[in-house]
Image (tube, grey):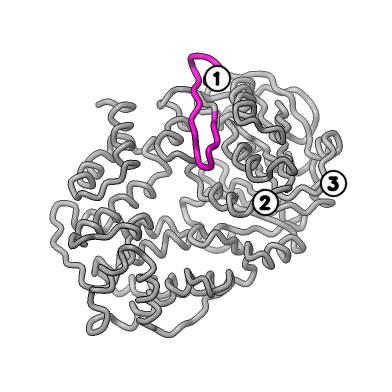
Amino acid sequence: MKINNTTETIKIVNDIHVTIPSSLQLMTPYVLHEQGDWFEDEIKFLRAFIKPGMEVVDIGANYGLYTLTIAKLVGEEGKVSAFEPTGATAACLRHSVVNNKFNNIDLIQAGLSDGIREADFFTSPNSELNSLSNVSASGAQHETVSLLTLDHCAKEYQWGDVDFIKLDAEGEESNILKSGKSFLSSSSPLVMFELKHGSEVNLSLINDFERLGYESYRLIPGLDVLVPFSPAEPVDGYLLNLFCCKKDKAALLEAEQVIVRGAEPLDCLPDLNVVREYFLRLPCGESINNLNFESSVSKDYEKILTAYALAHSESSDASEKVGYLLTALNCLRQMLKSDENRIEHLATYARIAFDAGERALGVQILTGLINKYINNMNFEVSEPVLPVASRYGSICPSGRIKEWLFSSVIEQYTSKHAYSTYFTRRATLPLLGKLRGLGFMSDAMKKTEQMIQKSFPS
């Protein structure tokens, strides 16, 4: 069903129908067709975090990927207040609300700022860049929109105990906080906000939240757990969003295994039995367990595999999982300093890095492997190895373990070195051609290849 000939409806995760522009030259339509979902790890985390009956506020709803996803999860007993100021984007979201038969979304066609007024809103063909600042929108188009304040809306729309806020206002976040202090002081939601404005880490926004008593956290994507964020530590270049909340909320979420406030490495002894048991739970496990576990595996590598297996054990609680994963990460960093060159080890390290939210490190490792082996796969797989892309854990190599492993390297690199092939375009085609030839290409990767060829002809 369409609003008009320039829109289409696409189904994403959890059978949600989203109305979007029908152009693969635009980012959101391209990403949704390519991935069947939004590219941010945080939307996957929220599918586990959001519960029926929650009250949620989405500031900067855009086409409603978060709004619609959350509305289905909170159910009829819950409520989502969604703010989207621009007419065309709000019209698409309004259509999606009706199309999904959601009665729990209050769509407010307005933006939020530090005062109630009208303002010029600069728009871009890619609505994700729409902004009160023409620097963000990078275009001359604009429309007049209504602006409200957070404190005003809390009273006007009679918000109760808001459980979660998504704040994505393209640089207007600090102004929103200025006129939202009363609400944010009296409430205690978990908030998700953009880490960067442009290419710069938004330290001022982190500090603004901290002055209101909100401490910042980042997502560990491989565990769907939040851990403390420190701007004093190196920031992964791919990290887009942070979370924050007050101490009382953090204590509740820690009890629910959502947050780990004391995230510290948890030591473990190398244990090949733990490693074997982990692999036996996977369809690829028999092939892995037939590799050399005893004679040549170093104790350092054995410890990394053990820590990773314990981080994914059902018997470990959230704090233990984070601790073991950090141990694996710290150990692999030390191994990389010693000019590690075994493909089994490097593939395993990349998998752990991605799980831990160290995406840039994972991409760096995969770049080296691809540069080394793309034209000549002159390596052997003789030690236990984690496939870089988790999907390959459910695939039995069937005697083709070299092709299986290198396919996982290429697929994960294609998925992770950019947020979407919308940004890399035809430069990705040679890798996809190599992937196809190895015989493990997924339907999703085949679709991506076809989309690039159709959307970006040479």
How far from the left and from the top, in percent, is residue 178? Answer: 78, 42
Q: Range of the magenta residues?
A: 3-18
Residue 315: within the magenta? Answer: no
The one nearer the camera, 146 or 33, is 33
- Left-right relation of 270 to 148: left
Within-10-Å neighbours for mark 2: few <14, some 14–19, many 20+: some
Within-10-Å neighbours for mark 3: few <14, some 14–19, many 20+: some
Q: Which-is-in-front pick, marks 2 and 1?
A: 2
Of labels 3 and 2, earlier in sequence is 2
Is residue 233 placed above or below 239 in the rendered structure? below
Q: Residue furthest top?
A: 5
Amino acid type for the residue under numbered disc 3: Ser
In the picture of the structure, the residue carrying the numbered disc 3 is 182
- Left-right relation of 94 to 155: left
- Left-right relation of 182 to 268: right
Give the SS element for disc 2.
loop
In the picture of the structure, the residue carrying the numbered disc 1 is 140
For the residues labelled 3 and 2, the Cα–Cα distance comes to 26 Å
In the picture of the structure, the residue carrying the numbered disc 2 is 51
Which quadrant of the figure contains the C terminus? top left
For the residues labelled 2 and 1, the Cα–Cα distance comes to 41 Å
Is residue 103 placed above or below 412 in the rendered structure? above
How far from the left and from the top, in percent, is residue 161? Answer: 80, 49
The reply to whether residue 240 is in sight is: yes
| Residue at the (54%, 74%) spot, across then down | 316
